Image: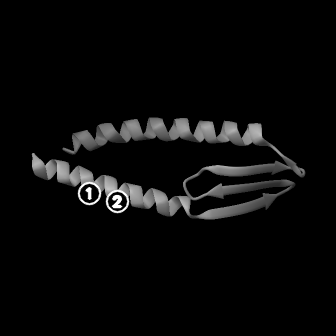
Amino acid sequence: MFDRFKKLYDLKKKADSMKKEMESIHLEVEERGVKIKIRGDQHFEEVVVDGKKEDRLREAINKAIKESQKKTAKKMQGRMEDLGF
């Protein structure tokens, strides 16, 4: 039983470390009048369309990504339980 908790704890530490590493990656892309600043964890920091900052669009995109990640995590949690974690 203790081994199981230790494995989960180690897995969580690794996941937290990976998350921090992904958050530290910053990327900026510009295409046809649209500029996007995004982090490696798929969080949009800025969306600019034809020189105008689009906060509502950025917020909607981030919300959609967050909801998608929640659903994916829930599905993965079920798979982890199937594997005995």
Task: Name the quadrant of the N terminus.
Answer: top left
Q: Nearer the viewer, residue 18 or 64?
A: 18
Location of mark 2 (residue) = 14
Residue at the spot 61% in from the left edge and 37% down from the top edge: 63
In the depicted structure, whether residue 20 falls above or below residue 70: below
Place of residue 53 in the rendered image (x, y in percent of width and height, measured from the top left): 83, 47
Display coloring = one colour
Q: Is residue 62 left or right of residue 6?
A: right
Q: Amino acid at mark 2?
A: Lys
Q: Are marks 2 and 1 in contact (CB under 8 Å)?
A: yes
Among the 4 quarters of the image, the one containing residue 79 = top left
Place of residue 34 in the rendered image (x, y in percent of width and height, measured from the top left): 82, 53
Place of residue 44 in the rendered image (x, y in percent of width and height, measured from the top left): 66, 50
Q: Which mark is residue 10?
A: 1
Q: Amino acid at mark 1?
A: Asp
Q: Which mark is residue 79?
A: none
In the depicted structure, whether residue 50 falls above or below residue 20: above
Residue at the spot 49% in from the left edge and 63% down from the top edge: 21
Residue at the spot 71% in from the left edge and 43% down from the top edge: 58
Q: Label 2's element?
A: helix
Residue at the spot 22% in from the left edge and 45% down from the top edge: 85
Q: Label 1's element?
A: helix
